[in-house]
Image (spheres, helix red, strand yellow):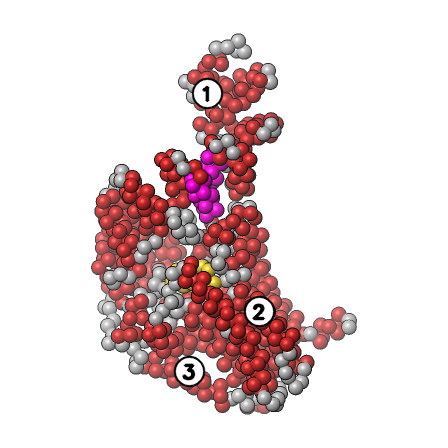
């Protein structure tokens, strides 16, 4: 087949790919969009050797489980499990370091792969290239997909979509190739293998067994095959077995490793599904069908009724019921529209279960689910007789509208500033406008502009506090859910006051900082996460004021509500300031007992305590090593290599120095250590060069320079190179004229 023939026959594949590249290519030149990405990528993953990445993975993420906190907005703590996804994150981080172009290219590549498999799947399902092509075009251009594709930390969404569409394409392909359809033993093992790979990479694909069942049933029904239901069950059963096994292992590992908020009681789960889920579900459909208000903070636009029997919640329930009826009634006349609505519901199930509320309202959870609604709409346009001739033009117009909206969305996400300004403009409450103005201030480098933005944030948040608080007659069970997620009026007032206090802290206004911390405390609910954070902030305030007893009191109050290593570490430092070394050691040890990416401070400190106070070098080395893996800081490498040198473990010291210089190649202390080790190993020239370089560096401390000069002086004296010996001896005296050894040498005959 010639190239021309290939392009003609496969227009439904390359046209969506070309459009995908054209709309997203501009995003490749942008940096990271959100300062969260700087933290997750620049500060957490970079500056390590490959061996250190492996060690860090087994230290922190060996089970594939990780926590995500949403307390700033909704008080939700989420748990994610990615058995193969997490190792892939580490590998990608090692290969890409902090290069935004590579991250964005990787996301675009994965999205393009998802587009290809969506085209192939839609073509196999509908047997129509035009429907497949326009489905892929509309989906890739849909503005709700922008976040998943161009946010560097969300590429697992694209990977999951690729797996999802690939499995459905493979299923539809083998059904078409073998009529009448009966699943074979080989195909059964293939289904189990593909499902296993997909779920181990990303938990978003957990609904794939249901998708296989629905797809097989609809396709066999559409092809007028007998025993469609029985064959659909047989086809999807291997996938259900895999997912059930995964779910058992997932829950077992989480229960051992992490205390998770997903372990809710049945009563809470029932209320969540009956009350929150319908409102979130309808909100997500509106995002797909009417993508007018797009923002990173969709929770602010989510309408939450306060009762089962209020109007909006009832409308949501009625709408969902109508969708269910439509799925059933349209299954014969408009099978792909019926299929698309049902599959969209299926794809959202995983997010509703895994992430109760806050993140569930985000646009990115419409990513691969929206493809099925798009498929249903496109197929309906082409199926309706009155649109037969104009269907391509209608589809082109729709894609054009989506593309323009998507392009504007990409520009909204150009960087942190444009993202936050866009979010401020779309926020409907003074609370969210104030919080996002604070975020905008944090990423502002100009000090005066930062102060202006922080002041503006305070004005907005104060207006929110001054508004009359709306009171509702709410169902007790529903009220408990809103309180648990800290979306009740009092919790929101507490968060606003706490944010104002943070603004005043940055502005250096201690009086107003304390005033609003106390206001936040008054508004907050007992034993809530918000109150724990406010107690912690009050503890920090009094610590900065050197009132360590009062600071300790607030830290303990925070600790009683939410014990965590950060609070334990703060308590230990207070005891250190109060010269209570027994309690200092107790809480420092407790803080260092939890190894996680969110707990990096205690290990270096505890290592120093063990080395200097206990002379427990073995455990000191252990904690220094942990600190060197968790921190993006040179000090743990210096402490670790210094202790190895103290114990004359030269080879181990050299390995640590080498790792440290991989991360911090210009650090003078590590270069000095390398020079001394090279001299010890007999590499005289390498050692001399390192010591000379250390002396030349402007950021080298005087102590290190003097030590390096003394070594050089002795080396040159042994080599009878008196000119260089005098040169570096004079340099010592220029730094410290009272240096005893240098003065003694100056009185010798070499001068």
Left or right of 307? Residue 152 is right
Provide the residue designation for mark 2: 163
Provide the residue designation for mark 1: 734
Q: In the rendered structure, find residue 558 and report the number of the disc placed on it.
A: none
Picture residue at 25% right of the left edge, 63% below the top: 525
Provide the residue designation for mark 3: 320
Picture residue at 49% right of the left edge, 14% below the top: 745
**Disc 3 packing (10 Å; few <14; some 14–19; many ≥20):** some
Residue 722, quarter of picture: top right
**Disc 1 packing (10 Å; few <14; some 14–19; many ≥20):** few
Picture residue at 45% right of the left edge, 70% below the top: 351
| Circle 2 SS class | helix
Left or right of 720? Residue 276 is left
| Circle 3 SS class | helix
Instruction: Write the start and end of the magenta stretch as one range.
Output: 619-643
| Circle 1 SS class | helix
């Amino acid at each position: 087949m010639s190239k021309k023939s290939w392009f003609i026959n496969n227009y439904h594949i390359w046209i969506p790919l070309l459009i995908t590249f054209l709309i997203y290519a501009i995003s490749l030149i942008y940096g990271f969009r959100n300062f969260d990405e700087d933290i997750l990528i620049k500060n957490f993953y970079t500056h390590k050797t490959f061996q250190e990445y492996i060690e860090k993975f087994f230290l922190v993420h060996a089970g594939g489980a990780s926590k995500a906190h949403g307390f700033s907005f909704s008080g939700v703590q989420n748990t994610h499990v990615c058995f193969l996804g997490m190792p892939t994150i580490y590998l990608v981080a090692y290969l890409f370091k902090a290069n935004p172009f590579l991250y964005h290219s990787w996301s675009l590549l994965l999205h393009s792969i998802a587009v290809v498999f969506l085209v192939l799947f839609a073509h196999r399902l509908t047997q129509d290239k035009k429907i497949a092509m326009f489905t892929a075009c509309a989906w890739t251009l849909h503005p709700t997909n922008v976040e998943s594709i161009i946010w560097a930390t969300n590429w697992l969404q694209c990977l999951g979509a690729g797996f999802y569409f690939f499995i459905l394409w493979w299923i539809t392909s083998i059904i078409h190739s073998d009529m009448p359809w009966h699943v074979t033993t080989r195909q059964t093992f293939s289904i189990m293998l593909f499902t296993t790979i997909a779920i181990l990479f990303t938990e978003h694909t957990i609904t794939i067994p249901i998708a296989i069942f629905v797809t097989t049933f609809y396709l066999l029904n559409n092809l007028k095959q007998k025993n469609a239901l029985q064959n659909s069950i047989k086809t999807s059963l291997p996938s259900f077995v895999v997912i059930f096994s995964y779910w058992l292992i997932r829950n077992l590992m989480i229960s051992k490793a992490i205390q998770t908020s997903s372990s809710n009681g049945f009563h809470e789960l029932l209320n969540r599904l009956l009350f929150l889920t319908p409102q979130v579900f309808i909100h997500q459909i509106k995002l797909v069908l009417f993508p007018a208000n797009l923002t990173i903070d969709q929770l602010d636009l989510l309408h939450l009724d306060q009762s089962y029997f209020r109007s909006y919640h009832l409308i949501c329930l009625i709408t969902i019921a109508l969708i269910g009826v439509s799925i059933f009634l349209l299954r014969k006349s408009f099978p792909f529209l019926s299929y698309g609505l049902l599959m969209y519901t299926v794809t959202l199930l995983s997010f509703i279960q895994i992430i109760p509320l806050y993140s569930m309202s985000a646009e990115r959870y419409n990513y691969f689910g929206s493809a099925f609604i798009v498929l249903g709409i496109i197929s309906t346009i082409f199926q309706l007789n009155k649109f037969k001739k104009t269907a391509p033009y209608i589809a082109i117009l729709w894609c054009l509208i989506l593309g323009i909206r998507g392009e504007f969305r990409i520009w909204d996400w150009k960087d942190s500033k444009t993202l936050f300004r866009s979010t401020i403009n779309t926020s409907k409450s003074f609370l969210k406008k104030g919080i996002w103005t604070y975020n905008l201030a944090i990423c502002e480098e100009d000090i005066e502009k930062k102060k202006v933005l922080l002041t503006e944030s305070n004005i907005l948040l104060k207006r929110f506090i001054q508004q009359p608080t709306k009171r509702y007659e709410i169902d007790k069970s529903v009220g408990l859910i809103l309180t648990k997620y800290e979306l009740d009026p009092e919790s929101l007032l507490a968060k606003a006051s706490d944010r104002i206090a943070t603004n005043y802290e940055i502005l250096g206004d201690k009086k107003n900082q304390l005033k609003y911390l106390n206001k936040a405390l008054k508004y907050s609910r007992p034993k809530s996460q918000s109150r724990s954070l406010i107690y912690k902030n009050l503890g920090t305030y009094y610590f900065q004021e050197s009132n360590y007893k009062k600071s300790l009191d607030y830290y303990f109050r925070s600790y009683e509500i939410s014990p965590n290593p950060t609070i334990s570490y703060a308590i230990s430092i207070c005891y250190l300031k109060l010269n209570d070394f027994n309690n200092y050691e107790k809480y420092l040890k407790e803080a260092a007992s939890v190894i996680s990416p969110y707990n990096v401070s205690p290990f270096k400190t505890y290592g120093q305590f063990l080395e200097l106070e206990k002379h427990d070098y073995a455990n000191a080395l252990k904690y220094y090593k942990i600190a060197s893996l968790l921190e993006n800081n040179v000090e743990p490498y210096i402490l670790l290599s210094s202790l190895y040198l103290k114990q004359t473990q030269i080879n181990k010291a050299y390995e640590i120095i080498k790792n440290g210089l991989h991360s911090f190649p210009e650090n003078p202390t590590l270069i000095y250590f390398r020079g001394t080790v090279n001299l010890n190993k007999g590499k005289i020239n390498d050692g001399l060069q390192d010591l000379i370089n250390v002396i030349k560096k402007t950021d080298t401390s005087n102590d290190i320079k003097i030590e390096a000069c003394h070594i050089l002086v002795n080396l040159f004296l042994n080599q009878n190179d008196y000119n260089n010996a005098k040169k570096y001896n004079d340099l010592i005296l220029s730094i410290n004229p009272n240096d005893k050894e240098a003065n003694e040498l100056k009185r010798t005959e070499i001068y």
